[in-house]
Amino acid sequence: MFADLFKEQDRVTSRRRRPSRRQRHDRLGLAWYTPEQWSRLRDLSTDKARLEDTYEEWRSFAEKAEADLLAEGVQVQRVPVDVDALATWCTQNRHPIDGEARAEFVAHLMRERAGNS
């Protein structure tokens, strides 16, 4: 399910060395579902075998992932996903509804919110 995480990095770069953790500002979008949306996602996804079986399992996994990332200093943004909007976006962009598409959709939503669509 980590495929549903979108990492947007704003790095202060140098040609000679990798930026330190202090120089790097990570913002990660975490796809966030309601129980109803989770059920719909499982119905439509082409990779449902890779998804948690229940909403409760997914939520537990997502909350642990979020806590782990926050502990590492990564900024995490929960991004509510409307699965019908995801399906429409996937159709328009000729993507199957899978982890890669979900991550790209979350990135799209984050850019829209930031005014960079």
Image (cartoon, rainbow, N blue to C red):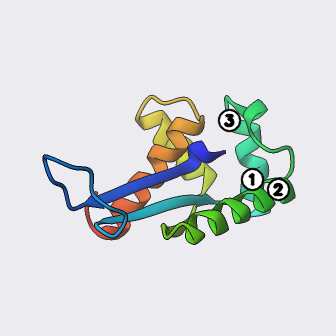
For numbered disc 1, what is the local secondary structure?
Answer: helix
- Report the side of 50 relative to 78 (left or right): right
Quarter assignment of residue 30:
bottom right
Q: Of 71 and 115, which appears nearest the observer?
A: 71
Q: CA distance from mark 2 to mark 1?
A: 6 Å
Q: Contact (CB < 8 A) between labels 2 and 1? A: yes
Circle 3: residue type = Ser
- Report the side of 110 relative to 87 (left or right): left
Label 1 neighbour load within 10 Å: few <14, some 14-19, many 20+ = many
Q: Contact (CB < 8 A) between labels 2 and 3? A: no
Q: Which residue is mark 3?
A: 45
For numbered disc 2, what is the local secondary structure?
Answer: helix
Circle 2: residue type = Tyr
Q: Residue at image x 60%, y 34%?
A: 98
Q: What is the quadrant of the N terminus in the image?
A: top right
Label 2 neighbour load within 10 Å: few <14, some 14-19, many 20+ = some
**Residue 91 in the image, given as x and y percentages of width and height:** 49, 34
Q: Of 23 and 62, which appears nearest the observer?
A: 23
Q: CA distance from mark 1 to mark 3?
A: 10 Å
Q: Residue at image x 51%, y 43%?
A: 88
Q: Residue at image x 57%, y 63%?
A: 69
Q: Which residue is mark 1?
A: 38
Label 3 neighbour load within 10 Å: few <14, some 14-19, many 20+ = some
Q: Earlier in the sequence, mark 2 or mark 1?
A: 1
Q: Which residue is mark 2?
A: 55
Find the residue positioned furthest to the left. 15
